[in-house]
Image: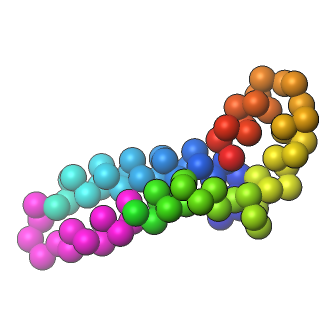
Amino acid sequence: MVGLATRLWALIGAAQSVVIALSVLNAPHEWPWAYYLMILIHLAFFATMAGRAYGVDGVLRPSWQASSHPLARVLVRLS
């Protein structure tokens, strides 16, 4: 995990975990709490903006905020 666009990837990971959980929860001997835990971990990454402290987002975010380029504005929102 490099911490680039952490919030975006956290939402994508949560969505993937929901899809996986919905597809396997009816299987015998499956642990539903494991999928709930994966979803909660992804949402925690989203809520705490994990990449801003020790990730690429934290290093590049000041230059993205100073830039007027539209892609930089999108990356500020996703980081």
**Picture quarter containing residue 67?**
top right
Residue 52: x %, y % from top left: 74, 58
Find the magenta span and give its range: 26-39
**21 versus 34 height, above or below:** above
Residue 16: x %, y % from top left: 39, 50
Query: Residue visible at 78% across and 23% down?
Result: 70
**Picture quarter containing residue 48?**
bottom right
From the viewer's perspective, tell me whether residue 32 is left or right of residue 71. left
Most extreme residue toward the front is 47
Dividing the image into 4 quarters, which one contains the N terminus?
bottom right
Q: Is residue 35 magenta?
A: yes
Q: Is residue 40 magenta?
A: no
From the viewer's perspective, tell me whether residue 67 is left or right of residue 19. right
Query: Residue visible at 55% across and 60% down?
Result: 45
Query: Residue visible at 35% across and 69% down?
Result: 37
Q: Nearer the viewer, residue 73 or 27?
A: 73
Q: What colour scheme governs how the chains and residues are painted in the rendered image of this protein?
A: rainbow
Query: Residue visible at 73% across and 39% down?
Result: 76
Residue 32: x %, y % from top left: 21, 68
Q: Nearer the viewer, residue 61 or 24?
A: 61
Residue 21: x %, y % from top left: 26, 58
From the viewer's perspective, tell me whether residue 7 is left or right of residue 68. left
